[in-house]
Image (cartoon, grey):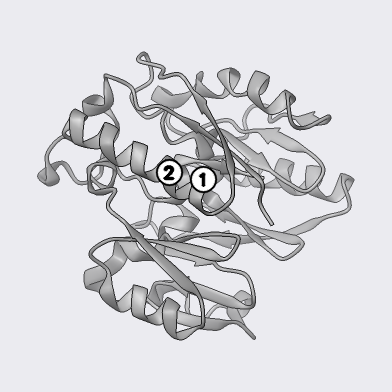
Amino acid sequence: MFTRAIVRRPARSLQSALSAHPELGPPDLDRAFRQHDVYIKALESAGLVVEVLPAMDDFPDSCFVEDVAVCARSFALIARPGAPSRQGEESAIREALSRHFRIIEGLSEPGTLEGGDVMAVGNAFHIGLSARTNAEGARQLLAALERHGQGGVIEPVPKDILHLKTGMSYLDDGIVVCLDAFKDRPSMAGLRRVPVPPDEARGANCLRINDTVLVPSGCPKVAAGVKAAGLKVVELDIGEFHKIDGGLSCLSLRF
């Protein structure tokens, strides 16, 4: 069960955020701020106390607060973003996490790691190797987990997928939502898969908060699959954040 979340307000520089899909155009700022407000309310409705951090206008991507830290059972780890323009965001999250975690681990060069590549599955973590998370970053996180009595496995991420959780989401109770690129992996053995069709690819990034699963709007097949698995679904429009490669999970840190 999660009880708390940390979010960061979108920057006024949001339109300069990184994007692999420039054809979608820049986000509309006013609409993005409204969507972020609704997102916060959804977290609160699912039972979380939400701490809202101020915007960091020098860092256009900084609302994607999940990428700068990993929250484990007994410690938090400050990440080191693989995108050079995001390096520096991580230093601003330490103070907030220190209010909730007694132990704060860190990551050192040449390791890079973004939280979008880290997915909890029970007591273990799946760590994605991507353009943003390198082998050394994954190794350092794995070592930290082992020091604290947890474990993990390393998952290669296809080159056309930004983060591990861009392509798959674990919803607890043995249920995983994922793209076809991940379906035949040994790590998926024994899990009940909710398939994500290509035309609903953004639906691979869902977010379970206690008894509620947040699903991006416009993904009716994914929403139906999650409901068929016996879970409550709330659909959220975060379309302005999809324009800059964002998803439901990366807009918050949950613990």
Q: Is residue 254 above or below residue 155?
A: above
Residue highlighted by disc 1:
44
- Quadrant (top left/top right/bottom left/bottom right) for the C terminus: top right
Taking 80 as reference, is 183 left or right? left
Label 1, secondary structure: give it: helix
Residue highlighted by disc 2:
41
Query: x, y (%) of residue 12?
Result: 27, 19
Q: Amino acid at mark 1?
A: Glu
Determine the CA span between mark 2 and mark 1. Answer: 5 Å
Taking 224 as reference, is 118 left or right? right
Taking 40 as reference, is 26 left or right? left
Looking at the rendering, which quadrant does residue 68 occupy?
top right
Q: Count residues near mark 1 (Cα–Cα under 10 Å), then give few for <14, some for 14-19, many for 20+.
A: some
- Quadrant (top left/top right/bottom left/bottom right) for the N terminus: bottom right
Query: x, y (%) of residue 248?
Result: 41, 51
Is there CB contact under 8 Å for labels 2 and 1? yes
- Residue at x-position 21% and y-position 71%: 199
Query: x, y (%) of residue 59?
Result: 38, 20
- Residue at x-position 85% and y-position 50%: 146
Q: Amino acid at mark 2?
A: Lys
Label 2, secondary structure: give it: helix
Taking 197 as reference, is 54 left or right? right
- Residue at x-position 43% and y-position 32%: 83
Q: Closer to the camera, 103 or 100?
A: 100
Q: Is residue 199 above or below residue 230?
A: above
Query: x, y (%) of residue 205?
Result: 41, 59
- Residue at x-position 48% and y-position 64%: 213
Pick out the residue farthest to the top: 58
